[in-house]
Amino acid sequence: MPIIVQKYGGSSLATPAHIKQVAELIKQRLKTGVQLCIVVSAMGKNTNQLLALAHEISKNPIRRELDMLLSCGERASMALLAMALDGLGVPSMSLTGSQSGIITDSTHSGAQIIEVRPSRVQEGLDQGKVVIIAGFQGVSINKEITTLGRGGSDTTAVAMAAALGADACEIYSDVAGVYSADPRIIADPKHIEQLSYDHMLELASSGAKVLNAQAVQFAKLKNIEIKARKTGDERGETLILNEASAFAKPSPFAKATGDKLADTAISIAVQEQLFCFAYEKTESLANLLNALDQLDIKPSQIIGTNTGYCLVAPEDAHGLSKLVPPVGISQMPDCASVSLIGNNLGNDMRVLSLALARMQAMQVRVLGITSSNLRLYFLIEPAKVHELVRALYRENIQ
Ligand code: ADP
Ligand code: ASP
Ligand code: MG
């Protein structure tokens, strides 16, 4: 029987009614003759609530204890879903990340999966049960509970799909896959039917939370095709797959550009709150990297700015307030980023000129720029970020 891994995100499990709806969807899907391994996120905004609780108790919560706390969100979801399935007469079994064999490195709140030993999951499936896994968590080689970073349940799903040799990996959220922009910022963005791993990776690491960047990286490595869908509505989906397949099948993007790789943007992404550290000399950078390493914080990138360089911290870095900036390093005021993703964008100066002109007209201060083959990235002052996204969308994508 085919094995399908499905992941349901927080908004799909926000209330008991949502959980019962997911249980019903699972029951219906079983009728198609498949084995189901279900990865769950914490209910609604539960992870944020737990984080806020931690910060009420401590300004700098201990990272180990933060992982102990945050991992409870997904555990609550898995147990409740198992109860809902029981109510429908569907046999199931819930497992924590550690019970599912998700082995990670020992970085708290940003762990990387290093191995998956899915024997208990496979056993449960062989017994005819739906196996429900708490996403976003694992156990380190030192037997400590770890979490995978915000949005990490997607990674659990992809890693489990790879370990089980699953026939499909379906990620369910409140949107029917990936669009040309965040539907919360751009009304009626274009739906993207398929996207290569590399495009999706750029999008995810530029702030499009619809899929987690580590999950996409894992999928690329293991060649797992991701189907991103909306819970309870299977009419639209986005397939994330390798480049050859992405361009082999027709898609709205392919139709718009013909066979040629066009110098056009296909999507825009935004990060609204970034912490950046400015420096002028590379000698200071080594000290900063050391100081961040002591706090287990992995910087996301380095970019050239108007006054030198800056190092960008990951969006969900915990414990940054503990950092004592080394000599030659200063923390910048809050920053935001806007990224255009597409083919050959970094080589197409027309898009860059147009964007710079727009920012000048809107009096948006550009703090730094990077370009690569697939992405044009602007670090800016955050004041008018949504207005800017809408203007750039109109000019480059609409
Ligand atoms: P879940 O809780 O199910 O994991 P997320 O909130 O992590 O869901 O991801 C879904 C959200 O991603 C959507 O509600 C949407 O606001 C946001 N999003 C950002 N960029 C995009 C995009 N390009 N396409 C679709 N959704 C996007
Ligand atoms: N619950 C975690 C978060 O909010 C993980 C996830 O949703 O994937 O980040
Ligand atoms: Mg998510």
Image (cartoon, helix red, strand yellow):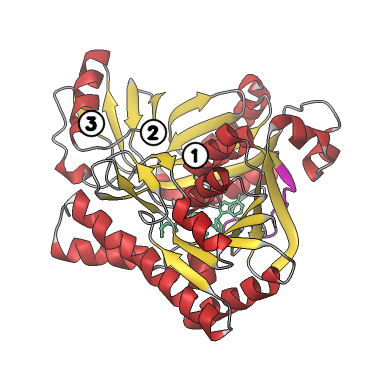
Dividing the picture into quarters, in which one does residue 244 lie?
A: top right
- Name the secondary structure under disc 3: helix
Please report the residue visible at 70 percent of the width from the left and 59 percent of the height from the top.
188
Cα–Cα span, label 3 and label 2: 13 Å
Q: Earlier in the sequence, mark 3 or mark 1?
A: 1
Residue 306 at x, y percent in the picture:
38, 23
Residue 298 visible in the current orientation: yes
Residue 299 magenta-drawn? no
Residue 189 magenta-drawn? yes
Q: Nearer the viewer, residue 116 or 194?
A: 116
Q: Earlier in the sequence, mark 3 or mark 2?
A: 3
Crowding at label 2, few (<14), some or many (≥20) Cα neighbours within 10 Å? few
Marks 2 and 1 in Cβ contact (< 8 Å) = yes
Q: Circle 3 is placed at which residue position?
A: 293
Please report the residue visible at 61 percent of the width from the left and 28 percent of the height from the top.
374
Cα–Cα span, label 3 and label 1: 20 Å
Q: Circle 1 is placed at which residue position?
A: 205
- Magenta part of the chain: 184-194
The answer to whether 5 is drawn above or below residue 52 in the figure is above
Please report the residue visible at 24 percent of the width from the left and 49 percent of the height from the top.
144
Q: Quadrant of ligand 1?
A: bottom right
Q: Earlier in the sequence, mark 2 or mark 1?
A: 1
Quadrant for the N terminus, please: bottom right
Type of the residue with mark 2: Ser
